[in-house]
Image: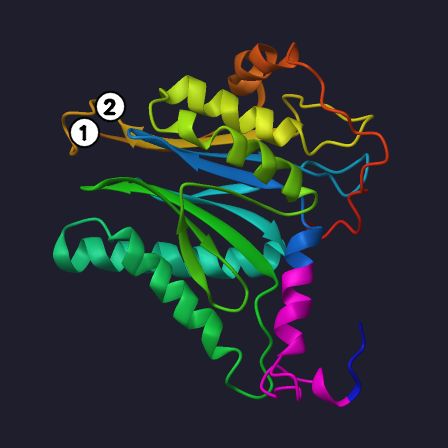
């Protein structure tokens, strides 16, 4: 992947109009463990596979609460994700102190997009090597946004990023029409099925390696009754995992490996 004179910094375009440092940062996202996000009329859900660097270490966190109405999932360099999540928390806190209201989701995502894009304009800086899925609710309903290292942001109905995420996206595309009418638990099960499709043959979803984050409305008719973003780990996800454990196993013969573990 070495590009000689055009990949030494993130401010130089190649003759083909490419910025290779940004593309390398996108590769770091592809090496991170997979995260999946999806939305319905009432809820937004994030599900993630956690990794441990070695047998003696704990599992790396993949889901983070930013404010009571928004949370995020990460794929890539956790240290970069920590910087961005702390920035988002500061912005949400400032919004509440100044205006006494929650930060609008599109504004929040635009702020981190602008922050990341600045790193492609100033010599001596590098792009953030992390991709984010930002899930939350506002007065218009649940939302899901994808953030890329280039600073690009997109609102999505469902999305998956990280290693082997194409398999999860295939499941999401096939079942997209079902998500809108799903309740909270059924939406979580769809997310876990998409996550399950990305696993290599000798791995399975367990209470140790699976995280689920949920935010939504307690009452669909009352947009102010927000069910705050909560991360479920351990025994909290056992029933959901068991409910999808008996699903037909996808064919994983000859599947692509997970590659370098970046979520460390």
Disc 2 and disc 1 in contact, CB within 8 angstroms: yes
Q: Residues within 10 Å of mark 2 (few under 14, many from 20)?
A: some
Q: CA distance from mark 2 to mark 1?
A: 6 Å
Q: Kindly state the secondary structure of the residue where label 2 is placed.
A: loop
Tell me if residue 60 can be seen. Answer: no
Q: Is residue 72 above or below residue 43?
A: below
Tell me if residue 242 can be seen. Answer: yes
Q: Residue at x 14, y 28 (%)?
A: 222
Q: Kindly state the secondary structure of the residue where label 1 is placed.
A: loop
Instruction: Mark 2 or mark 1: name the one nearer the start of the chain.
Output: 2
- In x, y percent, where is residue 113? 42, 66
| Nearer-the-camera pick, 125 or 194 | 194
Instruction: Find disc 1 in the rendering and name its residue.
Output: 225
Which portion, as a residue range, is magenta?
5-27
Say the numbered circle drawn on residue 44: none
Res. 107 image quadrant: bottom left
Instruction: Find disc 2 in the rendering and name its residue.
Output: 218
Q: Residue at x 46, y 65 (%)?
A: 152
| Nearer-the-camera pick, 35 or 52 | 35
- In x, y percent, where is residue 133? 48, 48
Q: Give the left or right position of residue 169, taking residue 7 as reference.
A: left
| Nearer-the-camera pick, 192 or 68 | 192
Quadrant (top left/top right/bottom left/bottom right) for the N terminus: bottom right
């Amino acid at each position: 992947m070495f590009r000689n004179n055009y990949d030494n910094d993130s401010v130089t375009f190649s003759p083909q109009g490419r910025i290779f440092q940004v593309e390398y940062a996108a590769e770091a996202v592809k090496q991170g463990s997979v995260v999946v996000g999806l939305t319905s009329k009432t809820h937004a859900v994030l599900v993630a596979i956690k990794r441990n660097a070695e047998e003696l270490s704990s599992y790396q966190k993949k889901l983070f609460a930013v404010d009571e109405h928004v949370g995020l999932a990460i794929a890539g360099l956790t240290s970069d994700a920590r910087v961005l999540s702390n920035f988002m928390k500061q912005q949400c806190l400032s919004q509440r102190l100044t205006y006494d209201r929650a930060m609008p989701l599109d504004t929040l995502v635009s702020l981190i997009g602008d922050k990341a894009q600045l790193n492609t304009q100033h010599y001596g800086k590098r792009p953030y090597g992390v991709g984010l899925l930002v899930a939350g609710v506002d007065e218009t309903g649940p939302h899901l946004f994808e953030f890329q290292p280039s600073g690009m942001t997109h609102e999505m109905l469902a999305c998956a990023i990280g290693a082997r995420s194409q398999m999860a996206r295939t499941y999401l595309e096939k079942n997209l029409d079902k998500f809108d009418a799903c309740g909270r638990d059924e939406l979580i099960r769809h997310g876990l099925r998409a996550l399950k499709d990305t696993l290599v043959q000798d791995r399975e979803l367990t209470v140790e390696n699976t995280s689920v984050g949920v935010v939504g409305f307690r009452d669909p008719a009352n947009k102010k009754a927000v069910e705050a973003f909560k991360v479920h780990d351990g025994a909290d996800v056992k029933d959901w995992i068991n409910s999808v454990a008996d699903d037909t196993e996808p064919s994983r013969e000859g599947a692509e490996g997970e590659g370098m573990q970046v979520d460390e």
